[in-house]
Image (cartoon, helix red, strand yellow):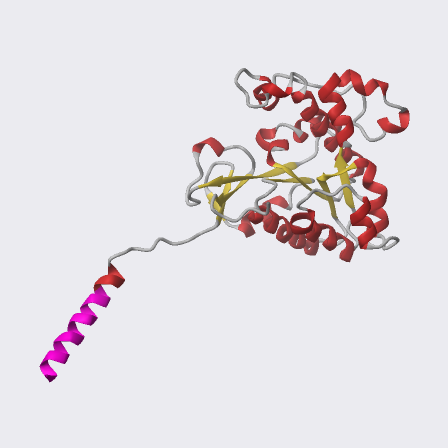
Amino acid sequence: MQMKNSILTLLALTTVLMLSTSFDFPEKRAWQLFDKNGQPVDYATMAEQLLEADVIFFGELHNNAISHWLQLELTIDLYHVDTTALILGAEMFERDNQLIINEYLSGLIRERDFESEARLWRNYRTDYKPLVSFAHEHGIPFIATNIPRRYAALVHARGFEGLEELSDEAKRYVAPLPVPYDPTLPGYAAMAGEGSPAMHAGPNLPKAQAIKDATMAWSIAEYWKPGQRFLHYNGSYHSDNDEGILWYLRHYKPGLNMMAISTVEQSQVDQLDSTYIGRADFVLVVNNRVTKTY
């Protein structure tokens, strides 16, 4: 009987050992940073290099939780490097809301009044409120850089010419007219290209994109001062490949040192897909199974 029990125990142990060694579980990683050459880089190295820039563009995927988390971490770290130098700005806020943003940040109005009256994106509470709250807590300027969406819609419907009919007061919220425009820039050309998913939206769609880029660039040029570090949050497509906002900002403010981060999603994060090499100074690769914020 004792021998039988010993044999059964040995068999059980053998089975457990076989099960524990029969599957090689892979390491789970949610994200990885790469430099513009496609080489892995750690966060500290990236942050140190970003300190050299006058303007930093953090290109996000709007529903990507990791990019929003890293935006906040970078904001906090840049603030603590020099608490007087940082200025924030975002695509997600339109220029005609600057007054209400300033009133909230200065403590003049209540948070609930700000949130009820500003035109906030649907993912504000999860993705952008932490940034605004940090600015509020530490007295950091936060600039609404984007064109009011009604004027972008006007360009979509009538081209740049539609903006000429705006009042002088309305034109304060738009980049100076006439707006420079290069339809051959790859990003805009792709929008207008044959077979583009955006083609059904009409031939003015690239111009509507351009007026957003131009106005965001103009806003940055207006508010940036020497010695400041402007951190701007925007969709990656507004700053990828040295185009979009960067192209316009070079026009409005030549000589600025600009650096950009782009966010992409891949099924694995250990190696940067060749498609994304050179897209930005740094590329944040996020596992495409990471939970979306909406």
Q: Main secondary structure of the magenta part?
A: helix
Task: Find residue 280 and report its horizontal and vertical position in percent.
Answer: 56, 35
Residue 16: name its quadrant.
bottom left
* Residue plotted at (59% across, 47% down): 293
Q: Residue at x 80, y 35 (%)?
A: 222
- 268 and 262: which one is in front? 268
- Which quadrant is the C terminus positioned in? top right
> In this rendering, is residue 116 above or below 217?
below
* Horizontal and vertical percent position of residue 43: 54, 50
Q: Nearer the viewer, residue 67 or 153?
A: 153
Q: Which residues fall within the magenta stretch?
A: 1-17
145 in the magenta segment: no
Could you tell me which quadrant the N terminus lies in? bottom left
Residue 138 percent coordinates (x, y): 77, 56
- Residue 249 picture quarter: top right
Q: Is residue 41 left or right of residue 87?
A: left
Q: Vertically, is 161 above or below 176?
A: above
Could you say where residue 154 lies in the image, as x and y percent from the top left? 76, 23
**Number of marks:** 0
Q: What residue sits 77% from the left and 57% below the top? A: 137
Residue at the bottom extreme, as displayed? 2
